[in-house]
Amino acid sequence: MTRTVRRTRRILQVTGAGAAALLALSACSSSDDSSSASDSSASDSGSPKLSGEVTVFAAASLKESFTTLGKEFEKAHPGTKVTFSFGGSDALAASITGGAPADVFASASPKTMKIVTDAGDASGTPATFVRNELEIATLPGNPDKVASLKDLTNADLKVVLCDKTVPCGAAAQKALDASKLKLTPVSYEEDVKSALNKVVLKEADASVVYKTDVKAAGDKVEGVEFPESADAINDYPITLLKSSKNTGTAKAFMELVQSSEGQKVLNEAGFLKP
Amino acid sequence: MTSPSLDKADAADTLTGGPRRRRTLRGVRGGAPLPLLLPALIGLAFLVLPLVALLVRAPWRSMPELLTSAEVWQALQLSLVCATAATAVSLVIGVPLAWLLARVDFPGRGLVRALVTLPLVLPPVVGGVALLMALGRNGVVGKWLDAWFGITLPFTTTGVVIAEAFVAMPFLVISVEGTLRAADPRYEEAATTLGASRFTAFRRVTLPLIAPGIAAGAVLAWARALGEFGATITFAGNFPGRTQTMPLAVYLALQNDPAAAIALSLVLLAVSIAVLAGLRDRWMTAS
């Protein structure tokens, strides 16, 4: 008798724990709903009502400037929090179309932005907010005397490029094609930061990256400009995402990026005006 | 409370393994208790469902085209060659290391064993960074390799083999060391008292004795090497035909052609299942 009671109680405990776990899981998915309704009305950047968390997926090349802008935003609107996920634009686009919870997407090329808009995940039309130019990153002091894109085809040089699937790789390829050069790198890296870091670590002699990345790396690399980069200037589009649960704050952050204040930060990082 | 004799039977069951126990459960109450069965089935579904989803979402129609492309063959070939080479490297230096850990009593053995198994729990990317710092062109050892012999390891196929061996070798060492500990050292002692040198005893007596353990460890290491991603992309980079193995190809394909990524994943899945299925019986009966 007592044994059956004890057993039933144990079953109840197990099912109870299971139910609690399920409840906790389902609560996660809907917990942010309440904040969206109140925020969407207050889209003015000056509104004091902004609050809550905003998740921004941004191209790896935007890391420094967006981090600065995020801090400025949080300071101007206490109670808000901007979290970033930086990476190769294609990987970010893939995770957005795969259902990753994000509010804003800033991509390094219209092509990757198109992946998101085609999938119907963008809210509104993406706007170009900056442009970026390519530059050659070489070791400090340029010991190999790299002066042009053609110098990179020298077989003695270890050059890394971005993979063609990511915007910096596509742009580099465009510049090479425009000047009819054939370049065999030692590796196709998965994003621009990883391509740059192989030079920072002195594992590679040179890399073709964005001007902004060369600037961000400081004196760890030396930048060499090349005229062909004019053929491969990348437009950076930004958009609000449909999955956003905090559209008011998200819009305000996008407005900051496009404002003269935001543009100043971006220009200082080496980005060109759209 | 249960009687002591029942406890003993339970212990014997645990020692002899699963089949008998399963039979007893079914015999007693006509099935496993629900609080065990339900989570067990959820557990099974959790592990199998993602693999089934891969089959469901596979682009079967374009599969032949996707899989016969030159890049896929290149990546698969490179994966197989590098995993095999990494296993060979692990065998040559891993088996002696396992023997040292199992048979020679030296101070700090526990620490050495912990260090050897460290790559098992280390995130592979960290392993890749560590390799880059040690063997990279500007690395602690790599600097001299480059200056004296002109050898650079990053961005080369050798680099892939090194990255894979670093991650996979601990599996072999652990497996061989366990088998060595289980094997009776008196056979070796008998051989040495009969005049064999310690090395001859190892070669002629110990090796055949622990062969199943070595085989099991080698298969584990090979499978781990085949799936290695983090250390490879960090240390060896990504270049088709030279350092782009299957997992790297899958990762990059996922970014612009998910269908191709699924197709490639299926190939890796098929190879892994084939290896496990082909060797499982031999393992079990041999050990």
Image (tube, rainbow, N blue to C red):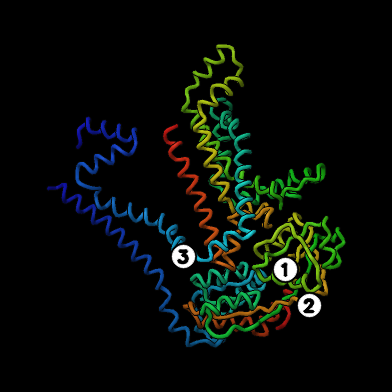
The chain ID associated with circle 3 is: B
Q: Residue B89 at x, y = what percent?
A: 63, 38
Q: Residue B270 at x, y = what percent?
A: 50, 52
Disc 1: which residue = A213
Q: Is residue A130 left or right of residue B124?
A: right
What is the secondary structure assignment of the residue under circle 2? Answer: helix
| Residue A176 to residue B230: above or below | below
Image point (72%, 48%), residue name = B153
Amino acid under label 3?
Answer: Arg
Res A78 seen here: no
**Badge 2 and badge 3 in a common chain:** no
| Among numbered discs 2 and 1, the one appearing first in the sequence | 1
Q: CA distance from mark 2 to mark 3?
A: 42 Å
Q: Residue A31 at x, y = what percent?
A: 40, 73
How many marks do you count on the picture? 3
| Residue A29 to residue B211: above or below | below
Q: CA distance from mark 2 to mark 1?
A: 17 Å
Say the numbered circle drawn on residue A230: 2
Of B172 and B216, nearer the camera is B216
Residues at marks 2 and 1 touching, judged by CB atoms closer than 8 Å: no
Of badges 2 and 3, the one in the foreground is: 3
**Badge 2 and badge 1 in a common chain:** yes
Neighbours of disc 2 within 10 Å: few (<14), some (14-19), many (20+): few
Say the numbered circle drawn on residue B57: 3
The chain ID associated with circle 1 is: A
Image point (31%, 59%), residue name = A18
Neighbours of disc 3 within 10 Å: few (<14), some (14-19), many (20+): few
The chain ID associated with circle 2 is: A
Say the numbered circle drawn on residue A43: none
Q: Is residue B183 left or right of residue B138?
A: left
